[in-house]
Image (cartoon, grey):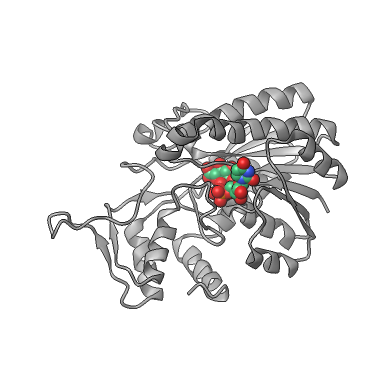
């Protein structure tokens, strides 16, 4: 069974990927500043794979190298990130680059001191930036990356810098641009400034607060269990035809459809699109941007790995609801 080191393993996508890999018997070494939540440790203990957590700084190349050598790591997935909003961009611009770019370079240098494991860099659809306003479909070849925020800029920089360093070291590097995830294990990690809109709606619903959407909004929401499967498909692939892949859903649905799903679980759930002319009604769900980003193409991923998402909206909704109930979140 492969030994997989995951940076950012205590985060939203990191926990989902760890669970997915442990379920098939991989050994996972979670490397993160923060410890995994207790609920995740309990879930991991019931799975066939072995899990070990290391508390460490992602910028510390020596410590990463020691962890890779000690655990005979054959695969590395880089998910540690600061997902910044405008406030954090102003407050700590350097830290965003130190972690999102510096942490990636530190891990690649560490990998060069170990058995040169295969490396998968978790990048982001945010690298497309302004292209998302105009393109019909965000494609790895045809769509120019035009990141607008420091987060997207740092991710694009990480992609280019990682490709250069991996080539110098002779390391097998793959890059997966993640779509916008929702689902189990999402929480406020303190370094992710905008929680997904589906999660915000759930938080309001569970606190018996009415939801007022800023507008209806369509997006190619990616259920995090599909994100974990897509990352795994790219990680497993013997010889990808390209270094960069979109990891996305391939279909869209709207936030009003999500509210309808939540209303099925929670009778009496009060939601609507905010009507500012009615008593100055304010929206209480924040979207990432004032426009709907174009969906990401998954044709390259589908053609090369055979990946197909398992969770359309009804399937994701049913699975998420069952998970929330089992975890006593509802
Ligand atoms: O969709 C995306 O764009 C992003 O999705 C995920 O990010 P996510 O899991 O949603 O973020 P968090 O839930 O905040 O997890 C990040 C983790 O990194 C860790 N981290 C962050 C910063 C740091 O310096 N060190 C460190 O270990 C945090 O403790 C946290 O556990 C991926 O991890 C990112 O690489 C990806 O770019």
Foreground residue among 69 and 24: 69
Q: Position of residue 294 (x, y in %)?
A: 39, 40
Q: Position of residue 98 (x, y in %)?
A: 60, 32
**Quadrant, the N terminus:** bottom right
Q: Quadrant of residue 56?
A: top right
Foreground residue among 309 and 208: 208
Figure check: 316 above or below 294: below
> Is 178 placed left or right of 166 in the picture?
left
Task: Give the residue at x 48% y 48%.
Answer: 180
Q: Quadrant of residue 15?
A: bottom right
Q: Position of residue 19 (x, y in %)?
A: 67, 60
Task: Give the residue at x 50% y 63%.
Answer: 316
Q: Position of residue 36 (x, y in %)?
A: 66, 58
Image label count: 0
Res 199 visible: yes
Q: Looking at this rendering, what residue extends furthest in the front direction?
A: 91
């Amino acid at each position: 069974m492969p030994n997989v080191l995951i940076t950012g393993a205590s985060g939203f996508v990191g926990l989902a990927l760890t669970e997915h890999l442990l379920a098939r018997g991989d050994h996972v070494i979670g490397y993160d500043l923060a410890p995994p939540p207790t609920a995740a440790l309990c879930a991991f203990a019931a799975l066939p794979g072995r899990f070990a957590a290391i508390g460490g700084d992602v910028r510390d190349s020596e410590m990463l190298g020691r962890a890779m050598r000690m655990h005979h790591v054959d695969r590395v997935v880089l998910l540690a990130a600061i997902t910044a909003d405008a406030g954090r961009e102003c407050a700590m611009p350097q830290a965003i680059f130190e972690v999102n770019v510096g942490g990636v370079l530190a891990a690649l240098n560490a990998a060069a001191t170990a058995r040169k494991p295969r490396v998968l860099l978790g990048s982001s659809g945010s690298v497309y930036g302004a292209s998302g306003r105009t393109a019909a479909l965000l494609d790895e070849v045809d769509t120019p990356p035009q990141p607008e925020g420091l987060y997207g800029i740092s991710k694009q920089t990480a992609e280019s810098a990682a490709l250069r360093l991996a080539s110098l070291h002779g390391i097998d590097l793959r890059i997966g641009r993640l779509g916008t995830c929702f689902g189990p294990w999402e929480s406020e990690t303190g370094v992710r400034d905008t929680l997904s809109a589906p999660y915000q709606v759930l938080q309001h619903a569970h606190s018996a607060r009415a939801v007022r959407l800023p507008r209806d909004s369509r997006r190619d929401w990616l259920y995090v269990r599909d994100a974990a499967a897509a990352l795994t498909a790219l990680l497993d692939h013997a010889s990808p035809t390209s270094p960069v892949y979109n990891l996305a859903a391939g279909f869209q649905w709207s936030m009003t459809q999500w509210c309808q799903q939540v209303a099925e679980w929670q009778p009496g759930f009060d939601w609507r699109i905010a009507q500012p002319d009615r008593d100055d009604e304010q929206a209480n769900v924040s979207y990432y941007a004032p426009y709907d980003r174009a969906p990401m193409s998954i044709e390259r991923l589908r053609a090369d790995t055979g990946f197909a998402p398992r969770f359309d909206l009804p399937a994701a909704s049913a699975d998420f609801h069952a998970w929330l109930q089992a975890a006593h979140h509802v």
